[in-house]
Structures are given as structure tokens and as C-alpha cells.
Image (cartoon, rainbow, N blue to C red):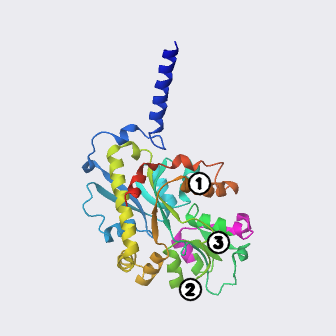
Amino acid sequence: MNRRIAALLAALTLIVATASGCGDSGEDADAATGPVDLTKVTLRVGDQKGVSIQSLLKAAGQLDGTPYKVSWSLFTSGPPILEAINAGAVDFGSVGNTPPVFAAAARSKIVIIGGTEVALDGQAIVVPRGSALKTPADLRGKKVAVAKGSSAHYHLLSVLKKNGLAFTDIQPQYLQPADALAAVSGGRVDAWAIWEPYTSQAEAQTGVRILADGKGYVNGYNFQITSRSALKDRNKVAALKDFLARFHKALLWANEHPQEWAKQWAADTGLPVEVAERAHRRRLATIIRLDDTVVAEEQRVADAFSEVRLVPGKVEIADFFDRRFNDIVSTR
């Protein structure tokens, strides 16, 4: 009888150990086994006008020789990209630290598979030229433009809290970057919470002044996102891993070739070259692993929004991370 019980316990231990190795997001084991045929894959990538993943990869030569097809869709900011990923219309996108929180709160079927950390000089709250606002505390009662659910949203929330203001102490104006630029230029808002390249663009075009940048307020995390359904397709998993590695290489290339990248970025977006170069230098990127520190920091972002009831309930952000792609980072 004792031998039979011992054998049963050993079998149960083996089952638990096997289950625990299946990945953080509980994807099918089939995603990591069997033959792979990348020629059958079309990877659908969501891009942002201001981020320009396509331009970056092209400039760095990382779109050459992909063994799969790539199709592109353009979005105004991170939240719409995650909506498209949740809807199954996009397989990959790179967004700031806040869009995943709002997507997770909405129970979207997104998964964080990669991360970068960018400098915070260009993550900014700006005010019009000649504004009487001198410190963040002066934002009380003012109209502040911000893209809802964007990294700028968290930056604004953090700046307010650190300067003794509640989010209810301002009048948020939820606007996408193009509309916000027009609003700040036309004097319809008192301030604008934004990111690069829009910070540099607004400085050059309208003479806005930075009231507070991101340093000391927020992390500089950007995340690469896919869908749970994509991670169940072993061909698409292989394509995602290859594409993410190419994206990392392109970021590192841009760090080492800022002028060359700025010229390409300017040509593709219509930005002046000097604006593109300034924007890039303000957000130089480092590739990071998705570890416990990153997850804990992102949980703090989620908790900050839950605390002021800008997202419903508690968000367990760890449920939306998948660390299987960390080996791409460890090899560089």
C-alpha cells in the first residue's frame, strides 16, 4: 500500500512539474512543438505614426529576407493597436506602459512578449508659449489634453499626485495627438501630456515649453504585444520571435546611427530632420527582459489607475506577461 501511494505521489509531482513549464499565459503546448513553415505566415503589425516601426526596420535593413509576409496597419496611439490585437486584426504592436493596463482591465486577450526602456526626456507635459503656468501645481483647474490610456495618461496622473493634486483637480481633455496639437496651438487647452516625437514637433512648430518631463515620475517601459490566439499557432510564434529579434536589432542600430535614422524617419513622416533627431535622442532605447522587477513596476502602474477608479477593479497584470521570448534578449 505504501509503495502504491508513493508511486501515485510521484506521478502527481511529474504532472505538476510538466504543467508549470507550459508558459506564464497557459498557451497550448502545441505552440512550441512540431514542424514550422514560416512561408505560410502573414504577420500583421500595428504601427503608430509617431513610432514608425516600419520605417525603423526598413532603415536598419531588418525587413530584408523575412521568411514570412508582413502587412502593416497604422494607428494613432497604443490603445487602438491593442483593441485591434484583441479583435484578432493585428498580431504585433509596440506600445507604452499604460495601454496594456487598460486592455487588461477590459479583459482583452493580449499578451506582453517583449520590453524596452526608453529615456524620459521627451515624455512631457507641455504648455503654450507665454503660458503663466510655471510648476505642475499650477495645473489645478486647468484643461489638459491627453490621449486616454496612453503612457502620457500615466505620466499626467503621476505628476499630479507627486505635486499634491488629484486627477479630479484638472479638466482632462481626451484627445489624440493630432487633435491635441491643434488644441494647444489654438489655445483651447492649457497644457498637453504627450510623448515623442510630438513633444519635439510641438516645440518646433508652436514654441511650447516643457512643464515636467518624465524623469522622477514614471518608468520608460515600452512593451511588445501579441494576442493569445497568435501564441497558439506555432508558425506564428516562430514568426513573432524572429520579428521581435529584428525589432530589437533595429532599435540598437538606431541608437548607434541617430543621424541616419533621423533622415529616414523624417522622410517617411514629414517631420523636419532636426525634429526627428531631437526626438530620437530623447528616447534612446534599451532592450529589457520581462522579469519580476518589470512585472512589479507595471503592477504599480495598474494600481495607480485602479486607485483613482480610472480602470475598474484590481488588475493582475502578471497574468498578461509571457516570458518565453526572453531568450532573444539573453543572446545579445
| Disc 3/disc 2 C-alpha distance (Å) | 17 Å
Magenta stretch? 160-182
Q: Is residue 237 above or below residue 136?
A: above
* Point 38% across, 55% down: residue: 328
- Provide residue 271's location: percent of width, then percent of height: 42, 79
- The residue indicated by pointer 1 is 296
Residue projecting furthest to the front: 3
Q: Which mark is residue 207?
A: 2
Q: Identify the mark nearer the N-term, 2 or 1.
A: 2
Q: Is residue 6 above or below residue 164?
A: above
| Disc 2/disc 1 C-alpha distance (Å) | 38 Å
Secondary structure of residue under mark 3: strand
Secondary structure of residue under mark 2: loop
Residue 174 part of the magenta-drawn span: yes
Residue projecting furthest to the top: 1
Q: Mark 2 Cα within 10 Å, few/some/many (few <14, many 20+)?
A: some
Secondary structure of residue under mark 1: helix
